Amino acid sequence: MEYFATVKLRESWENKACNHPRLEKVYYSGAFLINYACVQCGKEFSIAQKMELEKERKAARAHPE
């Protein structure tokens, strides 16, 4: 996902709740910026944050309430 697309998403999404259904790598002029963004709301995540989110989702699937 291009960096400026994430900016537009964040601006249009405002502060609504989002469960961040899918994260994609963020690029600027074709270069990977070492972070990820939610394709729904545009929130950016570091690699560590992305890994933590994936870990939480995996645990939730293993132990559904």
Image (spheres, rainbow, N blue to C red):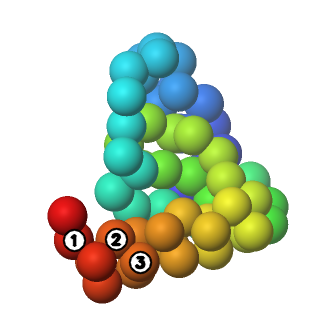
Residue 53 placed where, x, y %?
54, 64
Dot 1 lies on which element?
A: loop
Amino acid bearing label 2: Ala
Amino acid bearing label 3: Ala
Instruction: Report how far apart the C-alphas of labels 3 and 2 lie in the structure.
Output: 4 Å
Residue 59's label in the rendered image is: 3
Residue shown at the point (62%, 68%) measured from the top left: 52
Residue shown at the point (75%, 59%) measured from the top left: 46
Residue shown at the point (43%, 36%) measured from the top left: 41
Residue shown at the point (75%, 68%) measured from the top left: 48
Instruction: Report how far apart the C-alphas of labels 2 and 1 lie in the structure.
Output: 6 Å
Q: Are marks 3 and 2 in contact (CB under 8 Å)?
A: yes
Q: Residues within 10 Å of mark 2 (few under 14, many from 20)?
A: few
Q: Are marks 2 and 1 in contact (CB under 8 Å)?
A: yes
In terms of depth relative to the viewer, which is nearer, 25 or 28?
A: 25
Check the image and report above or below for 61 versus 4: below
